[in-house]
Amino acid sequence: MAPLVFMKEIRKVYPEGTVALRGASFELLEGEVHALLGENGAGKTTLMKILYGELRPTSGEIYFRGERVSFRSPQEAMRRGIAMVHQSFALVPTFTVLENLYLAISSVRKVSQGEVRSRAAELGKELGIEVPLNARVEQLPAGMRQRAEILKALLLEAKVIILDEPTSLLTPFEAEALIALIRRLRAKGVSFVYVTHKLREVKEVADRVTVLRKGLNVGTLQARETSEAEMAKLMVGAAVERAKRRPPREVGEVVLEVEGLVARDEMGVERLRGVSFSVRAGEIVGIAGVQGSGQRELAEAIAGLRRPERGSIRVRGVEIAGKPPREARRLGVLYVPELREEGLALEMNIVENSILARQRGHARGPLVDWGSAEERARGLVERFKVVFGSLWDRAAALSGGNQQRLMVGRELSSRGALLIAHEPTQGLDVTSAEMVREEILRLRDEGMAVLLISSDLDEVLELSDRVIVLFEGRSVGELRGEEASIEKVGRLMGGAA
Amino acid sequence: MIAALSEVALALAAALAFSSLLLLALGYDAASSLLTMFSYGFGNPEYLAAVAAPLVLSALAFLIPFKAGMFNIGGEGQAYLGALLFLYASQGLGALGIAAGALAGALLGGLVGALRAFLGVNEVIASIMINWTLFYVTLFSVSKYLTHPEYPHRSIDVGFSLGAPYSLLLAALAALAAYALLYRTLLGYEIRVVGSSPRAAAYAGIDARRAAVISMAIGGLFGGLAGTLKVMYVGHIDATMSALFGVGFLGIGVALIGRANPLGSVASALLLAGMIIGGHWMELRLGTPPELTDVIVGTTVLVLSAPYALKLLLKGGGLGGG
């Protein structure tokens, strides 16, 4: 049987010179769920955007049902039955689900809203896709939005649905429901490309798996016959030792005490609704929760970057709620923010970024002591393996992973009492992520209090001595590290009692 | 560095090519026009220094707030105010009048900075309005209170003058000071972080409002000095404001050609001053209209500053993908 889709030796060089794909090939059979596995930056999303007509390859050939094709736009791909559900959904938030479906379908063929409504209801019932057609998208949880996207693809009579990191915004429950839906649709003859970097999901959902590494496919395996270890090895190129949670040596006094914290986001939505907890010296407290459960507001409030509405934040006994960030810094708060453009001044050079937020420690009177700043920068890039051209290059010229290493390294190599690490390993390859985790454990062992906020549940469970689960701005559970399992935490993340 | 220089050379060539076409189209001898402009323009070092010095300062007036992420289009008004205050204060205080001119500019800049920082008033709009207000305040003062007893079309003479070479020296020292401020001091570092990314500044515990007020005040100080040096060389303020008008605006172009670098501004001020002087010679020798000089200088400013300005506009813009 000829493959449904065959992509042959696809190369993609971005205009600014980044090589995303170096001749990757990919094959999708009719009626299979094919996982595309790889680390961040391996080229998975780029390869699929090319199939979907969103990007054009620099070279290479694409065959659909044995016929050579070259899509110039997603509309062209959709007409042939290829649809893609992006990581951040492509729905208009202020429109209803129906309006969104109509918008997408009418851009491909002539149709009335009434037809879309009846067809959507019919399909939904047939396949068990429950989506409230008249609800506005912004009011729907992530899982529901994703189902709306899949419904959209099916209304377009998609034969191939590309799912890009589909579980990244979902609770474990929603993820389970998604996998069940994929199985039902496969039985109806729909093929899936399932883009992910999570090994566990591959085993659960896929028939076959193709592993990408640095823009090349390094192997295609039968998902049932392979092991997570084998896939990990292919993905990384070498076996990686995972950091093992180890019990703290000695837990000291309370360093951070948060009580009844209430805070709003930029839009005025109450994101934290009365959270209380404490972190002691020498322990790691992990915050788990679906994205948007108040994690960012929590981190920013402690760092002094967000004025809480109510509640108190005490660092080493000193009240800092609503005080400027300087105050938190003075008390020894180190902060790895979620966004790199916040923790780095990207237009400034590596040396200048190495002293960001501790510039006063590198001053002699009114002058900056550039000698000591440069020394710090050199130490940093060496220890955290930042790959760079010159120390006087702008941070913007570094790749995302190197920016992350620079920012995390700066915070982790500083003296302090409390570390707030928000997504500390995002964008890092497996090896550097492990290094960062190891450094966090080392700081804890040296007596630092650590608040770890991460959407990577494995990371939270691996490192934390205690886990606090946030759900809709409230702490819905606190577990000791050894009793926190994926199942337990996952249930709490989804709001189950 | 080499890339930057070749970019400037290419831009200059493009500006000259356009100017030549324009001259030819209007029936002038392009080759001898431009030759006149560039040979006579740079033939008198003292006059060159006198024209360039205020431009260096008005470039700094733009540049310091620019590094803090603000657009000081108020160098013009700061120059008027500086010139007026210097003219008045130098009558009794002599050289100390320079301090008066600089201080007046600093207060005005600081005021605009404070309006922006504490009340969210856009500094560009506020400055444009203040520019025109001060234009007429200066005109009014010159024709009502400071009028020359014998020549009613102009003000009394300044009470002190540095002379052209020292003016340029002062401007060069100001550029060095601005450079040291931006790249050697903690304050300069903080100003640049604010300009590079307000979010990173907040993260680093830097008070963005303080940076706004201080950088605008320092910019205003240089703007006031620019007006001071201009009126000092001319000797008085004319009732048509012809000498003062445009000193502040041209500084923006000078700063952008100098790639927003204080030392680069000295070089670009000298280049533009030479072209302005050469333009006058062109008018005398070949009878070209003064507007043509303005067009040629304007084109050069535009083309020379365009690559840098474009880069600033595009930075952070979403080019390419993940």
Image (cartoon, helix red, strand yellow):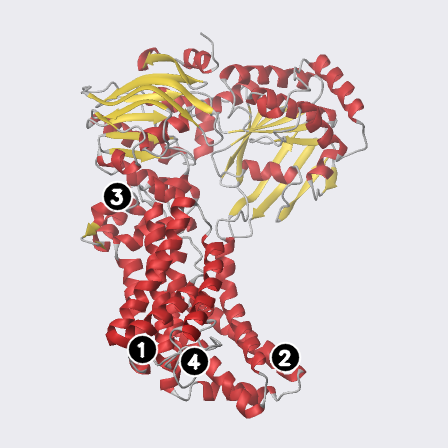
| Dots 1 and 4 on the same chain | yes
Chain where mark 1 sits: B
Q: Which residue is more in the foreground, B222 or A371?
A: B222
Asked whether the residues under the numbered discs 3 and 4 touch, taking CB atoms below 8 Å apart as contact, a structural biologist would say no
| Residue under pointer 1 | B167
Q: Residues within 10 Å of mark 4 (few under 14, many from 20)?
A: many
| Residue under pointer 3 | A358
| Residue under pointer 4 | B154
Task: Give whichever of discs 1 and 2 has the lower sequence position.
Answer: 2
- Three-letter code for the amino acid on which mark 4 is drawn: Arg
**Disc 2 secondary structure class:** helix
| Dots 3 and 2 on the same chain | no
Q: CA distance from mark 3 to mark 2?
A: 55 Å
Q: Which residue is more in the foreground, A396 or B228?
A: B228
Q: In the rendered image of this protein, does residue B190 appear above or below residue B224?
A: above
Q: Residues within 10 Å of mark 3 (few under 14, many from 20)?
A: some
Task: Give whichever of discs 1 and 4 has the lower sequence position.
Answer: 4
Q: Quadrant of the N terminus of chain A?
A: top right
Q: CA distance from mark 2 to mark 4?
A: 36 Å
Residue drawn at the location 43% of the way across and 36% of the way down = A427
Chain where mark 4 sits: B
- Three-letter code for the amino acid on which mark 3 is drawn: Arg
Residue A55 rendering spot, x and y as whole percentages? 63, 43
Visible in this render: residue A343?
A: yes
Observer-side mark, 1 or 4, equals 4
Asked whether the residues under the numbered discs 2 and 4 touch, taking CB atoms below 8 Å apart as contact, a structural biologist would say no
Based on the displayed image, in which of its 4 quarters is residue A147 positioned?
Answer: top right
